[in-house]
Amino acid sequence: MSNEPTANRGNKSTKNTRNNNSNTGNEDNGNTDNSTADHRPSPMEVLRQARAQFAELTGTAAESVSSFEQTEDGWSLEVEVLELERVPDTMSLMASYQVELDAQGQLTGYRRVQRYERGRADARRPGGR
């Protein structure tokens, strides 16, 4: 029985070591962020980061980017996503998401702004209808 608590203590110290390493890693990342704070990513870097981060958060890949602009706070883009695949493909449900990123290209928020069928020429109508 005395061996079991010792084994558990060993596991705890291993966990603490891992936590300490992760804290050290975060501190290193903080230093990296400070050194890269002056580096503003190129538009292509921002697009790649945005698509990857959006896919990781939502579990769906952006099929295209329909709007992309630099803002005071960073970047704003609209991505088109396949939400429900149907046959024929023109009946598949698509969605537009507004995605916001900070100046370094890190995703800060997103929201779905529209759903539509893929086969529609343009789901948006003038006047909000």
Image: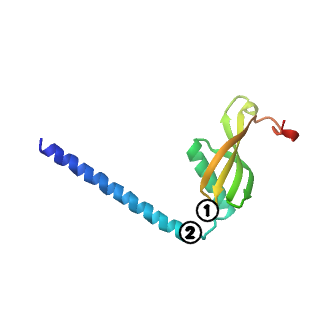
Question: Residue 84, can we see it?
Answer: yes
Q: Provide residue 42's location: percent of width, then percent of height.
A: 66, 64
| Nearer to us in this view, 120 or 20 | 20
Q: Provide residue 18's location: percent of width, then percent of height.
A: 34, 55
72 to the left or right of 31: right
Question: Residue 125, can we see it?
Answer: no
Q: Provide residue 53's location: percent of width, then percent of height.
A: 58, 51
Q: For residue 76, which quarter of the picture?
A: bottom right
Q: CA distance from mark 2 to mark 1?
A: 8 Å
Q: For residue 72, which quarter of the picture?
A: bottom right
Instruction: Classify the position of the C terminus by image quarter.
Output: top right
129 to the left or right of 11: right
Give the amino acid at mark 2. Thr
Q: Provide residue 106's location: percent of width, then percent of height.
A: 59, 56
Question: Residue at the location (39% across, 59% down)?
Answer: 23
Contact, mark 2 vs mark 1 (Cβ under 8 Å): yes
Q: Residue furthest top?
A: 87
| Nearer to us in this view, 122 or 22 | 22
**Mark on residue 87?**
none
**Mark on residue 36?**
2
Question: Residue at the location (22% across, 46% down)?
Answer: 8
Q: Which residue is mark 1?
A: 104
Question: Residue at the location (84% across, 39% down)?
Answer: 128
Q: Earlier in the sequence, mark 2 or mark 1?
A: 2
Looking at the rendered structure, the secondary structure element under dot 2 is helix
- Callout 1: few (<14), some (14-19), or many (20+) C-alpha neighbours within 10 Å? many
- Does residue 76 lie above or below 2 as drawn? below
Looking at the rendered structure, the secondary structure element under dot 1 is loop
Q: Residue furthest front?
A: 72
